[in-house]
Amino acid sequence: MEILKQIRWQDILDILLVALILYSVLLIIKGTRALKILIGLMILLITFLLSGYIGLYTMDWLIQSLWAQIVLALVILFQPEIRRTLAKMGEARFLPSLTSAEELRSLEEIVRAAVALANRKIGALFVIQRETNLEDFIEVGTPLDAKVSHELLLSIFHPTSPIHDGAVVIRGNRIIAAGCFLPLSLSAAISKTYGTRHRAGIGLSEETDAIVIIISEETGAISTAVGGKLEKNMDMGSLRDFLTGTFASPKNKKT
């Protein structure tokens, strides 16, 4: 009881904040290679403590010499997770809302293009920007700034097009750029049957809040990636419902 009396409210808040941070970190690295790296570091720490306790002086000296480099090693090893976390923290609403007619027309053009490409088994990546700025990925692509139309999307991803490789980035009702290269996901949870296109779509959705539509060149299947999760085998109706529910729902409109 005496110990409980010495606990301040600041101590409770401190413990809760540390627990929240640790929980958030575990959620971020869950299913990634970072979790295995973290386990390895914990084993190294336990080895260090035991070596000093039982008198393994050479081992103790060797591990102590590594601690000077531990901060740099952590930054390098956890770079994808750190970048993804900072991107989510920096999300800000800056895009003007479209009218209902503009939203629905642009979304319908995207759906028509995705289905047409899938029927022809032409691989494609559509990135629809939401709140996170995608300027870093747009810069490496070919700038377009054209109105969204299924004809333009089909022409971009035609195999003879010089900009068919990579992804198109759509902001509002405009195609901002094409031929954009996306970061590949390093998650071990992704099936090995998925190729670079799917890993790129999932990778961007892990780092940003963008909606990514992936059309498989091998099977013609349509998938969507949001928040690092892949929704497979979508048809015209389910894709339309998903996009409409995401972008044209009342909660996304100005009051």
Image: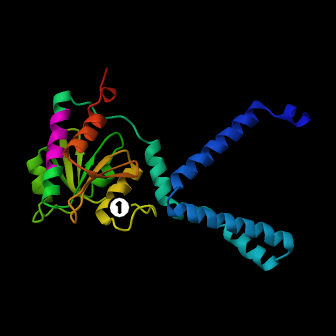
Identify residue type, mark 1: Arg
Return the residue nearer the eye: 240 or 110: 240
- Crowd rating for badge 1 (residues with CA inside 10 Å; few <14, some 14–19, many 20+): many
In the figure, residue 209 lies in which quadrant? top left
What residue is drawn where x is 67% and y is 66%? Answer: 68
The image's colour scheme reads rainbow
Q: Residue 22's x, y, as percent? A: 62, 48
Element assignment for label 1: helix
Relative to 127, is 17 above or below? above
Q: Does residue 18 appear anywhere in the picture?
A: yes
Q: Residue 170's x, y, as percent? A: 23, 45
Q: How many marks?
A: 1
Classify the position of the N terminus by image quarter.
Answer: top right
Q: Residue 204's x, y, as percent? A: 36, 54
Magenta stretch holds residue 186:
no
What residue is drawn where x is 48% and y is 49%? Answer: 85
Q: Does residue 72 appear anywhere in the picture?
A: no
What residue is drawn where x is 66% and y is 44%? Answer: 18
Return the residue nearer the eye: 130 or 27: 27
Most common secondary structure along the magenta stretch: helix
Task: Kindly identify which residue carries mark 1.
Answer: 199
In the figure, residue 36 lies in which quadrant? bottom right
Span colored in magenta:
103-113
Classify the position of the C terminus by image quarter.
Answer: top left
Return the residue nearer the eye: 51 or 119: 119
Q: Residue 243's x, y, as percent? A: 26, 40
